[in-house]
Amino acid sequence: MLIQMRTQILTPLLQVSALAGLLTIAGCRQSGVTVDVVNDTSQVIETITLTGETGVASAAIPSETVGPLAPGKQQRVVLSEITGEGSYSIQVVFEDGRELKGAGGAYVEGGYRMSETVKETEIISETDLY
């Protein structure tokens, strides 16, 4: 009788604990890398190109190109194919044709949130891991 009572109490508790653990893991790992690009210049950015690689073998993923982006505005880009380890680089082209590249090769993992602030002569990267 005592064993049956313990089983009736413990089984639902174990099920709830397992479910809570799965939900926690699922919530921590999101697909893709979110990149917020901020135009902190006096010019319109005509195109923003994000080029990425994923996995240990450095498999290239399709580039994401967006734009235009007005001065003082920001645009969010999701690199949905980077779900594990990877990297990406950023390049922008201004309305006058001038090109600017980021440092390149920023290490990321699925779920990371990145911020790329485009200045007149450089691109500043910041990472928010999750």
Image (cartoon, grey):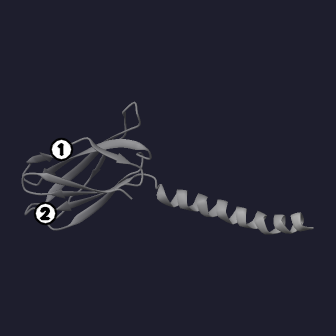
Q: Position of residue 39 (x, y in %)?
A: 16, 61
Q: Which quadrant, please, contains the N terminus?
A: bottom right
Task: Residue lying at the far top in this picture: please name it.
Answer: 57
* Residue 52 or residue 68, whichever sits in front: 52
Label 1 amino acid? Ala
State the residue at coordinates (59%, 60%): 21
Q: Which quadrant, please, contains the C terminus?
A: bottom left
Res 46 quadrant in image? bottom left
Question: Could you say whether the residue bearing mark 1 is in a helix, strand or loop?
Answer: loop
Query: Residue 30 vs residue 51: left or right?
Result: right
Q: Position of residue 16 (x, y in %)?
A: 68, 66
Task: Residue lying at the far front in this picture: please name it.
Answer: 2
Q: Decide: marks 1, 2 in contact (CB < 8 A)? A: no
Q: Sequence order check: which comes first, mark 1 or mark 2?
A: 2
Mark carried by residue 40:
2
Mark carried by residue 80:
none
Task: Residue lying at the far right in this picture: please name it.
Answer: 1
| Label 1 Cα crowd, 10 Å radius (few <14 / some 14-19 / many 20+) | some
* Residue 56 or residue 62, whichever sits in front: 56
State the residue at coordinates (24%, 47%): 49
Label 2 amino acid? Asp
Residue topped by disc 1: 103
| Vertical placement of residue 8 versus 48, above or below | below
Q: Position of residue 97 (x, y in %)?
A: 9, 48
| Label 2 Cα crowd, 10 Å radius (few <14 / some 14-19 / many 20+) | some
Q: Position of residue 64 (x, y in %)?
A: 31, 48
Res 128 quadrant in image? bottom left
State the residue at coordinates (44%, 44%): 84
Q: CA distance from mark 1 to mark 2?
A: 17 Å
State the residue at coordinates (40%, 45%): 82
Q: Nearer the viewer, mark 1 or mark 2?
A: 1
